Image (tube, rainbow, N blue to C red):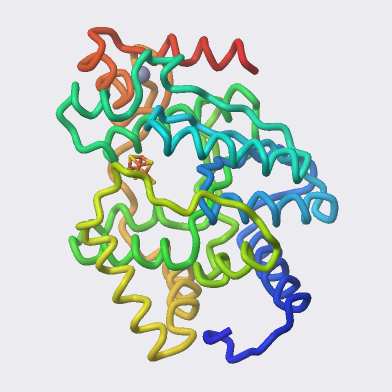
Amino acid sequence: MHHSRLWLCREHFNKFIENRVMRTIKRYNLIRRGDRVLLGLSGGKDSVVLAYILSKLRETIGFKLYLTHLNLGIGEYSKKTVEIVRKISEKINAPLIILDLREILSIGIPELALKTRRPPCSVCGVVKRYLLNALAVELKADSIATGHNLDDMVTFILREFLVQNLEQIPKLAPRIEGAEDYLATKIKPLYETYEEDIKKYAELNNIDYVEEKCPLADEKTITSSLKKHLGILENKFPGLTIGFIRRFVKNLEKYPKPRDTIRRCSICGMPSSGEVCSFCKITQKALGKPMGPYAREYIREIV
Ligand code: Q46
Ligand code: ZN
């Protein structure tokens, strides 16, 4: 392990990574005894490895783990992700809820992007956030866990700093508190785990994940360039990234608080920064009808 200047065997490497996730959970108070944690599984290495590690820690900490996957309706790619998440759910013995976008909206992300004339990842982000939150609220989950790793988080922080979007920076903390009964708390247990280590952990433990990238991913973004350069810097100065994130959390209070207050969407009652939430707006534009209330009903029936 380049960053820690350690050479470990398989067994000790596994212990090292699992301890690191455990320490992150404790340090930032991410999961408490008796919690119900809903993990958003994309099928990629990060969320799949997180599912695997959380399943190992659930008895020691004493929490319940639920998995969910959103079938985005992106052809063969989505079919493959569904297969992978089913496998992991069986392997770790955790209940899995699959939400199918084509069942909820009758169209998938590619058509939604075309009809709204917005970049696919932008509509996809809105849809994923909305459905994941709605499911967590319905399940009365204490938190939503996501697989964002150390490299992701440092990249996001640097990007917001570069464009001087300082108010967005506090939203990149390891734990974001929810509100009342409509906004779930979000946690990131891989906040201090290097992406490279997650890949190694998957390889060493024969954990299957979807290796190909989503065909709609835009490779030419500031984020992807930043991540590449961050990798080069980390190679030159081992430990730079982990040192940065720990100091960042200590300094969080110094960043300006977000000005946009969260209220309830007047159509579906879910969190929104304006009168109507982005999900209702997008679906209104693409389908002629805001689908927030329908999506909530669909989820209520599944749960
Ligand atoms: S799934 Fe969705 Fe990603 Fe595909 S359309 Fe973009 S955001 S790239 S993580
Ligand atoms: Zn709404």
Indicate the quadrant of ligand 1 in the picture: top left
Q: Quadrant of residue 9?
A: bottom right
Image point 58% across, 87% down: which residue?
4
Q: Quadrant of residue 29?
A: bottom right
In the image, residue 280 sits, relative to residue 166, either above or below, namely above
Which quadrant does the C terminus fall into? top right
The percent coordinates of residue 291 (x first, y second) are 36, 13
The percent coordinates of residue 230 (x first, y second) are 34, 76
Image point 64% across, 89% down: which residue?
6
The foreground one among 264 and 242 is 242
The answer to whether 82 appears left or right of 245 in the picture is: right
Which quadrant does the N terminus fall into? bottom right
The answer to whether 133 appears left or right of 85 in the picture is: left
In the image, residue 170 sits, relative to residue 248, either above or below, namely above
The percent coordinates of residue 121 (x first, y second) are 29, 40
The answer to whether 19 appears left or right of 105 in the picture is: right
The answer to whether 148 appears left or right of 156 in the picture is: right
**Image label count:** 0
